[in-house]
Image: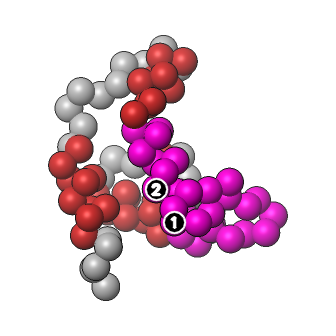
Amino acid sequence: MTPGSPDDVRSRAELATFVRALRQDLGRPEQPWENATLEDFLTALASWIEDSGGRYRRFGETLPADGDWTFFARALDAATAYE
């Protein structure tokens, strides 16, 4: 299953589905991830979060000020131990 566009995610359920699709996509030999290890992935994630304003400017968009950053941080933290 190839993940859809992140721009199509509108709910918590769709986010969970998107993340599961990313997991299934990981390791596909026909399109390997550049950041396939957890260490590289988390490093790239932190870097992208810091630099994300550039992505929005490049596409003529405004970085959402009202994103639920706490929810995302809690989800990442919980995933370190959640089964």
Whether residue 65 is visible, yes or no, is yes
What residue sits right under mark 1 in the picture?
38
Q: Residue 68, located in which quarter of the rendered image?
A: top left
Neighbour tally class for label 2: few under 14, some 14-19, many 20 plus, Cα within 10 Å? some
Rendered position, 4 above or below 82: above
How packed mark 1 is, by other alpha carbons closer than 10 Å (few <14, some 14-19, many 20 or more), is: few
Find residue 70 and report its horizontal and vertical position in percent: 18, 49
In the picture shown, does residue 62 fall above or below 7? above
Q: Residue at x 28, y 79 (%)?
A: 81
- Tag 2, which secondary structure? helix
Q: Which residue is mark 2?
A: 42
Depth check: give the residue in front, 71 or 7. 71
Residue 10 in picture, x, y percent from top left: 33, 47
Q: Residue at x 25, y 54 (%)?
A: 73
In depth, the one of 1 and 62 nearer the eye is 62
Residues under labels 1 and 2: Cα distance? 6 Å
**Percent coordinates x, y for residue 26 in the rendering:** 62, 68
Q: Amino acid at mark 1?
A: Leu
Picture quadrant where residue 64 is located: top left
Name the side, left or right, on which 79 lies relative to 20.
left
Q: Amino acid at mark 2?
A: Leu
Q: Is residue 73 magenta?
A: no
Q: Is residue 72 above or below residue 77?
A: above
Name of the residue lying farthest toward the right: 30
The quadrant of the picture occupied by the C terminus is: bottom left
Viewer-nearest residue: 8 or 37:
37
Span highlighted in magenta in the image: 21-49
